[in-house]
Amino acid sequence: MLALGLVALLSVLWCVCSHWRDVLSGRPVGALRGVRAPLLLIAHPDDECMFFAPTILGLLQEQRPLSVLCCSTGNYYNQGEVRRKELFQSCAALGIPASNVTVIDHRNLPDSPNVHWDTHLLSDLILTHIKQKNIDLVITFDEKGISGHSNHISLYHAIRSLHDSRKLPEGCSVVVLESVNVFRKYLSVLDIPISWLFHSDILYISSKTQYRQAKDAMMCHQSQLLWFRHIYLLFSRYMAINSLHFLHGQKTEKDS
Ligand SMILES: *[C@@H]1O[C@H](CO)[C@@H](O)[C@H](O)[C@H]1NC(C)=O
Ligand SMILES: [Zn+2]
């Protein structure tokens, strides 16, 4: 009886949240005013659609020219060449042409959960790319790296050091994707009211169509589609919701 009630309650909540998603999608909170050239900075092929799809699709919907810098080929299981191709396919499915996607393949930046990438090397490579492409907004992981992968966290430290040492070009700001606790992480759309209540600088919620597009992009990563990835697709909040925060010290500049 209790279980039945719980299922009924969850179903109702799910419907309410799905409705909320339709209302809220396409209306980002705290839109990124005046951004000309945003860059998505990721560690592995599949980070873009597993974690950042709502942001990517939101930015593209706002007609912002987007580029992607991926700092490894995802070669942990020696599948680097395949995974690099999958990244280009996935980006195309999301609406980003191959010419806007760059993959770094550096022997000192291996895809590995046990390796912390060298902050100096990484930040030099990232800064060069930012300058080349005239980037004025970098989007990347926060200090917990969503899944806790040390390569994700290395990206945060690299961008943090560029930011704190004021090496980023004038007017270039940074937003990081908020890591939520494991309970919220798998609530899917049920996390919409929670994300709405907690403060974030930017909140992107995907519409049903955008969710499907993100799923199609995920399907491009054939080499990664083990059974647990399908569960992830169903329940991960990151397929539907992205909450982001400006790195401290930049927000007021941008707003003024
Ligand atoms: C790709 O990059 C170019 C050059 O920065 C830009 O004009 C274009 O809008 C970008 N495409 C997308 C889909 O973001
Ligand atoms: Zn990753």
Image (cartoon, rainbow, N blue to C red):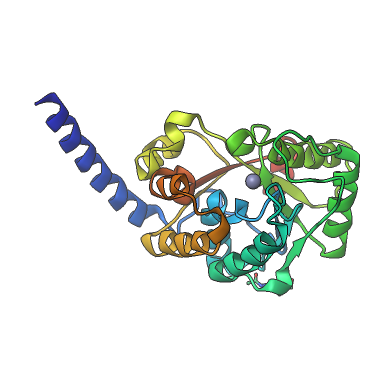
Identify which residue, 169 or 4, lies in the foreground: 4
- 64 or 256: nearer the viewer: 64
Q: Is residue 56 above or below residue 12?
A: below
In the image, taking residue 78 as reference, residue 224 lies left or right, namely: left
Identity of the residue drawn at 84% across and 59% down:
129
Quadrant the N terminus occupies: top left
> Residue 34 at what x, y percent from top left?
67, 60
Q: Is residue 253 visible?
A: yes
Q: Is residue 93 above or below residue 149?
A: below
- Residue in the image at 70% along x and 47% along y: 76
Image position of 206 (left or right of 72): left
Picture residue at 85% right of the left edge, 42% below the top = 162
Q: Nearer the viewer, residue 37 or 222?
A: 222
Residue 137: horizontal and vertical position, in percent? 72, 54
Q: How many marks?
A: 0
Give the image location of residue 172, x and y in percent: 79, 52
Residue 63 location (% of width, % of height): 59, 70
**Which residue occupies 34% across, 40% down?**
190
Observer-nearest of 255 and 83: 83
